[in-house]
């Protein structure tokens, strides 16, 4: 299978992203994968604050590579370095009825939300966001696209555009399938959605002390006042993390917590320790990647070359089909 996925350059990734990334790693084992940074997509909302896009692109690439995305095995690249995405978008824009874009459920919602915060986002580029995404996918004639639930309407539009093109001209494109992985949401240390904007995240490259500090901030069973009060792990955020990062100890912790034999401070110390053990190799690899001058540039150049070769072949077929 040819698999493709992308992320907007949001900068450093956090442990909440690990479920998506581990899915990518699995797919990478058995498929021809394309993973790219959607920096043009970042422009659809951040066209007036572009200064951080390049830095964020590099930070995110470093995280991908640190967790094991392999630029030899997969094609890892930056969207804006493969101009064919834009050419295909232009052709798609000729055949896509405006109403298809206007009815994408995220569109009106987001325009309104951002308008409420004083940002006018009713641009041509923003309306075309899902069409650019369709071009990203179809330029590689991808069969499958691992995405979150929120992206399903975009995938549906992508399939519709592929069908319309194939019908109008010649069958060039497969209709890509969404691959929905079970990406259980890991809450941030304050219990809300994990997000940099809340400052409740544990980033993949976080220093040991930062991990310890963030774990200490975590909300536990609020009914527990003294450390030998019986606790209820079911309502404890630390416990959610223990089930992921301390599988071997989790039964012991459950019983000890219920019987009031372990205090939250000790429980958190155990979590911080295993989280740090888990993150150590990622942290090291990440630091090495960023310390080696030119390494990320080489990865991007290599990815650009491989991606462009595949994209050019699609455009050859597209031009022939459209007769232009
Ligand atoms: N829209 C996706 C997101 O916000 C990012 C993205 C852009 C993408 N192009 C893509 C994902 C193509 C999959 C395939 O997460
Ligand atoms: Fe949560 Fe652990 Fe405290 Fe129990 S002991 S409430 S599981 S932090």
Image (tube, rainbow, N blue to C red):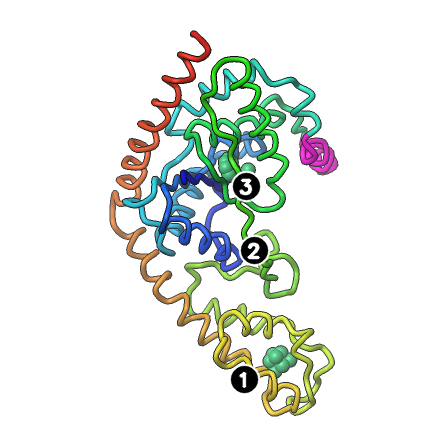
SS at badge 1: helix
Quick one: label 3 or label 1, which is nearer the N terminus? Answer: 3
Q: Is residue 181 above or below residue 116?
A: below
According to the image, label 2 marks what residue?
Answer: 183
Nearest-to-viewer mark from 1 and 2 = 2
According to the image, label 1 marks what residue?
Answer: 266
Q: Is residue 51 visible?
A: no
Q: Is residue 173 visible?
A: yes
SS at badge 3: strand
Image quadrant assignment for residue 56:
top left
Nearest-to-viewer mark from 3 and 1 = 3
Q: Quick one: 161 or 305, which is closer to the camera?
A: 161
The x and y percentages for residue 254 are 60, 83
Residue occupying the point 65% across, 25% down: 101
Query: Within 10 angstroms of label 2, few (less than 14), some, or many (20 or more) residues?
Result: some
**The stretch drawn in magenta includes residue 115:** yes
Quick one: label 2 or label 3, which is nearer the N terminus? Answer: 3
Q: Which residues are magenta?
A: 104-119
Residue occupying the point 30% across, 33% down: 306
- For the stretch drawn in magenta, the main secondary structure is helix
Q: Is residue 256 above or below residue 101?
A: below
Image quadrant of ligand 2? bottom right
Image quadrant assignment for residue 112:
top right
The x and y percentages for residue 27 are 41, 49
According to the image, label 3 marks what residue?
Answer: 178
Label 1 vs label 2: CA separation?
29 Å
Query: Within 10 angstroms of label 3, few (less than 14), some, or many (20 or more) residues?
Result: some
Q: Is residue 306 left or right of residue 201?
A: left
Quadrant in the picture for the C terminus: top left
SS at badge 2: loop
Q: Are marks 3 and 1 in contact (CB under 8 Å)?
A: no
């Amino acid at each position: 299978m040819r698999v493709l996925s992308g992320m907007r350059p949001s900068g450093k990734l956090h442990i909440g992203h690990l479920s998506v990334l581990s899915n990518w790693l699995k797919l990478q084992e058995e498929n021809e994968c394309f993973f790219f940074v959607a920096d043009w997509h970042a422009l659809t909302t951040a066209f007036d604050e572009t200064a951080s896009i390049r830095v964020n692109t590099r930070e995110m690439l470093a995280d991908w590579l640190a967790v094991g995305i392999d630029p030899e095995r997969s094609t890892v690249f930056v969207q804006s370095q493969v101009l064919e995405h834009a050419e295909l978008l232009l052709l798609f824009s000729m055949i896509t009825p405006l109403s298809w874009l206007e009815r994408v459920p995220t569109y009106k919602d987001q325009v309104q939300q951002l308008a409420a915060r004083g940002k006018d986002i009713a641009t041509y580029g923003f309306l075309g966001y899902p069409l650019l995404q369709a071009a990203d996918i179809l330029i590689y004639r991808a069969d499958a696209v691992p995405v979150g639930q929120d992206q399903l309407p975009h995938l549906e539009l992508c399939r519709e555009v592929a069908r319309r093109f194939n019908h109008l001209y010649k069958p060039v494109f497969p209709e890509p399938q969404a691959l929905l992985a079970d990406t259980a949401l890991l809450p941030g240390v304050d219990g809300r959605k994990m997000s940099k904007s809340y400052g409740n995240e544990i980033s993949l490259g976080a220093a040991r002390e930062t991990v310890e500090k963030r774990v200490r901030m975590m909300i536990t069973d609020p009914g527990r006042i003294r450390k030998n009060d019986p606790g209820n792990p079911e309502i404890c955020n630390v416990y959610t993390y223990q089930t992921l990062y301390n599988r071997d100890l989790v039964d012991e912790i459950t019983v000890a917590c219920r019987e009031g034999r372990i205090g939250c401070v000790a429980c958190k110390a155990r979590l911080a320790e295993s989280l740090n053990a888990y993150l150590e190799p990622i942290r090291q690899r990440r630091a090495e990647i960023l310390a080696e001058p030119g390494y990320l540039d080489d990865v991007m150049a290599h990815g650009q070359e491989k991606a462009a070769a595949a994209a050019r072949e699609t455009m050859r077929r597209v031009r022939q089909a459209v007769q232009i």
